Amino acid sequence: MYSLYLHIPFCAHRCAYCDFNTYAGQEAMIPAYVDALTREINFVGQQLKDHETTRPGDYSTIGTVFFGGGTPSLLSPLQFESVFKSLRAAFTLTSDPEITIEANPGTVSYKALCELRGIGINRISFGVQSANMEELRMLERTHDFFDVIEAVTSARKAGFDNLNLDLIYGLPEQRLETWQTTVKRILDLHPEHISAYALTLEHGTPFGRWASKGLLPLPNPDLAAEMYEWLGETLEANGYIQYEISNWAKNVEGRKSKVMASTFDFRPLTPLLACRHNLQYWRSLPYLAFGAGAHGYANDYRYSNVLRIKTYIERITNPRSTNLQFPLSPAAVNQHKQTIKDNMSEYMLNNLRLIQAGVAEADFRSRFGSGLMEAYGTEIEELIRLGLLERASEVIRLTQRGRLLGNRVFLQFV
Ligand code: SF4
C-alpha cells in the first residue's frame, strides 16, 4: 500500500526557526500551483497504473494522504476539492484512508473546517509549538494560544475526532515551568495525538544566524532532556502511549500498545490513533510525493522535486520529457536508485524510531532475505553493551537512555 504526501509551500509569514521549503508573500501563485499539483497527480497516477500492469500484485491502494507544508490551510476548500477530484481519479483509496492536513491556528474558520471535513479530510495537525506568548513571539509565530483554543473548538464542532498538536521544546531561555504550563494547557484540549520536537538551530534561518553571531542564547541540552523526560512521564500519566521518539497517541480503546510489537500492519494500531501516514515512513514503506520540494520513496527510488514554486509550476505545465520512470514526475530533480544496503540502513534508522515496535527480526528477514544479526550483529551487540538498545522478544529497540541519544545509535547504521 502506498501513502501520498502533498507539499503546500505557502506561509503567511516565515517563522524564525523554520527551514522547510516554504515561502511567504507568494499566495498569488496558489491557483496555478493547485493546477500544477493536479497535473502531477494525474501524471504519476497514470505511471502507477502502467507500473502495476508490468508488476501485478505490487501495491495498488492508498492508505494515507498527508497535506504538509508550509500552511496547507491557506488553500480554500474549493482548491482542496479540485485536488481530491484528481486524487480519486488517479488512485484507489482504501475504504478508511487517513487524510491529514497541517494547519496553523488562526488560519482556519469553522466554516472552512466543516467544508474540509465534508471533502473527506479526517485528521488535522495544528502547529501550536507553545502556549507561552513570549515564546510564540520569539519563534515569530503569528498566533496566540487563544487562536489554538478557538481552532481546536471549531475543529471538534466540525466533526474532527482525530487531532494532533505539535509542540517545540528546548527553546533559548525557555524554563521548565513554562514548558510544563504549555503541556498542561495542551492536555486540557484533549488531543488524540501529540508531537514534540526539540528545537534545532538550522543554517539559513534567522535563528541560525542570530545564534552564530552570539545574539541568541543556545538551547540548553540538559534542560531540553529534562523537558523531554518530564513530558514523557506526564503524557503517560494522562493516558497517552509513546510509540515513536517524538510522538504520543491516545489509547482510545484502552488497549495496550503491545499490539505494536507483534505486528507489522498498521491497522491494529488504529485504537492507538498513531499517525498512520508517519508510520509508513518509519516502517520504510513507499510513499509518493507531490509539489515543490516534496520527497518520495517508491520503486526503490528516493527522489525529490524542484524547490521553487515558479519552477515547479513551469516544469509540470511544460514538461521537457514525459518518458520518465515511475514514480518520477517532470518536477523531480534529485533521484537515487537505492541499493539493498541503502534500504537496510534506512530500515534500521526508521524502525528504531518506533520505540516499542522497534526492529522485528522476522520483518527484517522477510524484507531483505537475510537475518538482522547477520547484517548488523556487531553494531547491535555494541549498542546493547552501551545500554542504548535492548532485546525484547524478537525485537530490538531503543532503551530509555537510547531515546535521548538516538542520533548516536542511528550513526552506527549509516
Ligand atoms: S508556519 Fe510552519 S512551515 Fe510556515 S514558516 Fe512557520 S514553521 Fe515554517
Image (tube, rainbow, N blue to C red):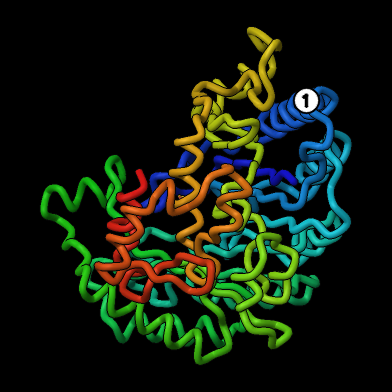
Residue 72: x %, y % from top left: 63, 49
Image coordinates of residue 15 in percent, x first then y, are 40, 53
| Figure quadrant of the C terminus | top left
Instruction: List x then y, in percent, for residue 131.
Output: 44, 77
Q: Residue at x 63, y 23 (%)?
A: 328
* Between 268 and 4, the one nearer to me in the picture: 268
Give the labeled residue for mark 1. Answer: 51
For this orientation, the residue located farthest to the bottom is 237
Q: Tell me the quarter of the picture where residue 188 sits.
A: bottom right
How dense is the environment of label 1, judged by Cα within 10 Å: few (below 14), some, or many (20 and up)?
A: some
The quadrant holding residue 406 is: bottom left
Q: Residue at x 63, y 63 (%)?
A: 275
Q: Nearer the viewer, residue 220 or 78?
A: 220
Residue 253 versus residue 148 in the image, above or below? below
SS at badge 1: helix
- Please say whether residue 91 is visible from this viewpoint: yes
Residue shown at 69% from the left, 57% from the top: 100
Question: Residue flagged by tag 1: what amino acid is it?
Answer: His
Q: Position of residue 161 (x, y in %)?
A: 74, 74
Drawn side of residue 66 relative to residue 80, left or right: left
Residue drawn at (83%, 57%) of the image: 120
Residue at the farthest left position:
214
In the figure, residue 299 lies in which quadrant? Answer: top right
Q: Nearer the viewer, residue 375 or 330?
A: 375
**Viewed as shown, does residue 173 lie left or right of 407?**
left
User: Does the image show residue 23?
Assistant: no
255 over 71 or under it: above or below: below
Respond yes or no on whether mark 1 lies under 8 Å from ligand 1.
no
